[in-house]
Image (cartoon, rainbow, N blue to C red):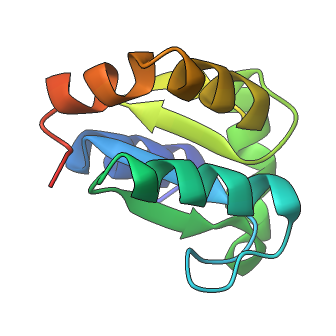
């Protein structure tokens, strides 16, 4: 399976996917850590992918999303954005609504 096929499978198999540096329990950058904190504050159920575990996927995702940085948050297969966008949506109350609409809140 190609890296693009793996990405597509992850996005179709999960309503919310966070591509991040590290894991939710051990984020390896401040931006990934902040997105995890926001998702937890929203009581979100989400899948995560540690981009350090798969260098091929890490590079393919940049092309797939046309977004050069991490973390990248996807909801229902659509790129929401990185840390700044996620924090902005959270501060406006829009992230919780988006996650609830995807059936991804606990």
Image location of residue 63, percent across then percent down:
76, 30
**Image vertical order of residue 59 relative to residue 74, above or below:** below
Q: Number of numbered discs present? A: 0
For the residue pair 78 and 5, the one nearer the viewer reads as 78
Q: Is residue 86 visible?
A: yes
Say if 40 sits above or below 94 in the image. Answer: below
Residue nearer the viewer, 16 or 77: 16
Residue 45 coordinates in the image, percent (x, y): 26, 57
Q: Quadrant of the N terminus?
A: bottom left
Q: Is residue 11 left or right of residue 29?
A: left
Foreground residue, 50 or 46? 46
- 59 lies above or below 87: below
- In the displayed structure, 38 sits above or below 55; it is above
Q: Residue at x 36, y 45 (%)?
A: 42
Residue 102 rendering spot, x and y as whole percentages: 19, 29
Residue at horizontal 37 percent and vertical 52 percent from the top = 10
Left or right of 30? Residue 50 is left
Quarter-wise, where is residue 22 in the image?
Answer: bottom right
Would residue 76 be seen by someone viewing this image from the given angle?
no
Q: Is residue 57 left or right of residue 31?
A: left
The image quadrant that residue 12 belongs to is: top left
Residue at x 63%, y 50% (from the top left corner): 35
User: Image quadrant of residue 16?
Assistant: top left
Q: Is residue 48 left or right of residue 14?
A: right
The spot of residue 85 in percent (x, y) is 69, 22
Q: Quadrant of the C terminus?
A: bottom left
């Amino acid at each position: 399976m190609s890296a693009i096929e793996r990405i597509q499978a992850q996005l179709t198999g999960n309503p919310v996917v966070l591509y991040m540096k590290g894991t939710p329990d051990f984020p390896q950058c401040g931006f990934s850590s902040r997105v995890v904190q926001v998702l937890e504050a929203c009581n979100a159920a989400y899948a995560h992918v540690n981009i350090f575990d798969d260098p091929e996927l890490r590079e393919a995702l940049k092309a797939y999303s046309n977004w050069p940085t991490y973390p990248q948050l996807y909801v229902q297969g659509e790129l929401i954005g990185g840390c700044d966008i996620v924090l902005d949506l959270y501060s406006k109350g829009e992230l919780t609504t988006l996650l609830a609409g995807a059936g991804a809140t606990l």
